Image (spheres, helix red, strand yellow):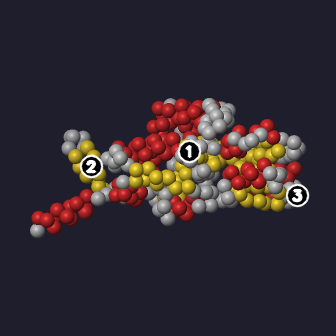
Amino acid sequence: MKKIVSIVLVGFSIGLGLIQSSNGQSQTTEFTGTLKKIKESGRIVLGVRESSIPFSYLDNNQKSIGYSIDLCLKVVDSLKKQLQLPNLKVETNPVTSQTRIPLMASGVIDLECGSTTNTKERQKQVAFSVAHYISSVRMAVKANSNIKTLDDLDGKPVVTTSGTTSDSLIKQNERGKKINVVNLYGKDHAESFLILETGRASAFVMDDVLLAGLIANSKKPDDFQIVGAPLSVEPYGLMLRKDDPAFKKVVDDTLKSVFKSGEVNRLYTKWFLRPIPPRGIKLNLPLGDALKSAFQKPSDQGK
């Protein structure tokens, strides 16, 4: 009988954690959702991008690096403490603009560390952390193209990455300005830029910071420029599963702590103002007022 009880207790302890009460005594708390999944498996799977410079991309050793990766690793450190898993294993799983939401919803990845815009439409399927970056959607063109505005794209091929908000913005502006463009799609940002670089598209519509990273890493950066008025302002958040408040609290609390301590300024300088791998290029993107405000008053409000 004692052996049976022992087995039951061991089984019941899975998914439980020990926390210290105010009187110094240990008590158990039951983890749910993603926290339980991570506690039981001893691993967390991060969804990563391969060409979202400087947020999440691969270095010369095929290792995932970037601003969003660093923030996600801060979350991992918090999880190690909260779940009492000092040897928590971190795995990465590549995602694209098209696969990131399905892979999150299906449980393949636990936290997406990329450049995903938090929108109310996406919130119907997934959840987001407080914003860690604010970008604007513009377009990259060849410097000698004489393209300055959306009106200049009439009758021309325009590329964007499949599954991004930029795609819908192109369609909206086609209707509003009565211009006619030929829509082309890249499977990821690298392929979309290649389509522009090789002359198959006249413009690449995407978040300005991503365009800046792709241009800076191109063979001839001076051949390109970012033009046009912003089509939209995009708040980026770390993506996680919907209806998982306990895990979201860990993620949000971690980011808020990084913001409040000022550590985020060091990370911003590292990725947006200093030379970054693999080629030692600099994006030279100063911290804007919108992002400063987002750090001071964290919000997960979607666009």
Gap between marks 1 and 2, in whole Å? Answer: 39 Å
Gap between marks 1 and 3, in whole Å? Answer: 42 Å
Residue furthest to the left: 1
In the picture of the structure, the residue carrying the numbered disc 2 is 18
Q: Residue at x 47, y 32 (%)?
A: 261
**Amino acid found under the numbered disc labelled 2:** Leu
**Amino acid found under the numbered disc labelled 3:** Gly
**Residue 125 seen anywhere in this rendered image of the structure:** no
Looking at the rendered structure, the secondary structure element under dot 1 is: loop
Near-viewer residue (289 or 54): 54
In the picture of the structure, the residue carrying the numbered disc 3 is 155
Q: Residue at x 34, y 58 (%)?
A: 40
Quadrant assignment, res 168: bottom right
Near-viewer residue (190 or 212): 190
- The location of residue 1, given as percent across then percent down, is 11, 68
Looking at the rendered structure, the secondary structure element under dot 2 is: strand
Q: Is residue 9 left or right of residue 142?
A: left
Q: Disc number at residue 134?
A: none
Q: Residue at x 52, y 55 (%)?
A: 93
Number of numbered markers: 3
**Mark positioned earlier in the residue sequence (3 or 2):** 2
Label 1 crowd bin: few (<14), some (14–19), many (20+), radius 10 Å:
few
In the picture of the structure, the residue carrying the numbered disc 1 is 61
**Mark positioned earlier in the residue sequence (1 or 3):** 1
- The location of residue 79, given as percent across then percent down, is 39, 47
Label 3 crowd bin: few (<14), some (14–19), many (20+), radius 10 Å:
few
Looking at the rendered structure, the secondary structure element under dot 3 is: loop
